[in-house]
C-alpha cells in the first residue's frame, strides 16, 4: 500500500509565505515525477509545480518567481515554498507522485489535500 500525505497549509496574509510538505510512504520501488496541484472553488484542478527525480522543474506561469518546488529523494518528500502569496492563490493544494511499486505496478498517487487561504 502507498500513501501520499500533505501538510503545511493554513491561513496567511497577502504577501506572506507558507511551506507545504508532502511525504510518500509504503511499498515503493521508485518515485518518478512529484508535483503540486491546486483547486479553487468552482475551478478545475491545475498544475502548480512539478519536479522530476533528476531535479528538473516546471511551474505554472502564475507562480513563477514566487513558488519553489524541491525534493528530498532519500526521504521521499517534496516541498513547495510559497512566497509573496496573493488572494488568488487560495485553494486546496494536492500532492501527486508517480510511483512504481514493483516491476509491474506504476500509478499516480494523490494526497488528500491541504487548504491554503490567503486573506487579510
Image (spheres, rainbow, N blue to C red):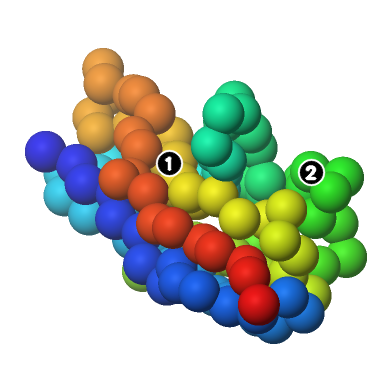
Query: Dot 2: what SS?
Result: loop
> Which disc is residue 81 wearing?
none
The residue to which callout 2 is attached is 60
Residue reaching furthest to the front: 120
Residue 67 location (% of width, % of height) = 74, 65
Residue at image coords 57%, 29% = 42
For residue 3, above or below residue 45 = below
The residue to which callout 1 is attached is 97
Residue at image coords 24%, 33% = 101
Query: Dot 1: what SS?
Result: strand
Q: Observer-nearest residue: 7 or 86? A: 86
Badge 2 or badge 1: first in the primary sequence:
2
Tell me: 11 left or right of 81.
left
Quadrant into which the C terminus falls: bottom right
Task: Select label 2 or label 1 by which is in front.
Answer: 2
- Would residue 12 be seen by someone viewing this image from the given angle? yes
Q: Quadrant of residue 85?
A: bottom right
Amino acid at each position: 500500500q502507498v500513501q501520499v500525505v500533505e501538510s503545511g497549509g493554513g491561513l496567511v496574509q497577502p504577501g506572506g509565505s507558507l511551506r507545504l510538505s508532502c511525504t510518500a510512504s509504503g511499498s515503493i520501488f521508485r518515485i518518478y515525477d512529484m508535483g503540486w496541484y491546486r483547486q479553487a472553488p468552482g475551478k478545475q484542478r491545475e498544475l502548480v509545480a512539478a519536479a522530476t527525480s533528476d531535479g528538473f522543474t516546471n511551474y505554472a506561469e502564475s507562480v513563477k518567481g514566487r513558488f519553489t518546488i524541491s525534493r528530498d529523494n532519500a526521504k521521499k518528500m517534496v516541498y513547495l515554498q510559497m512566497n509573496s502569496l496573493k488572494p488568488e492563490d487560495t485553494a486546496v493544494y494536492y500532492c501527486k507522485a508517480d510511483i512504481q511499486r514493483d516491476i509491474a505496478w506504476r500509478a499516480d498517487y494523490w494526497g488528500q489535500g491541504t487548504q491554503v487561504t490567503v486573506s487579510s
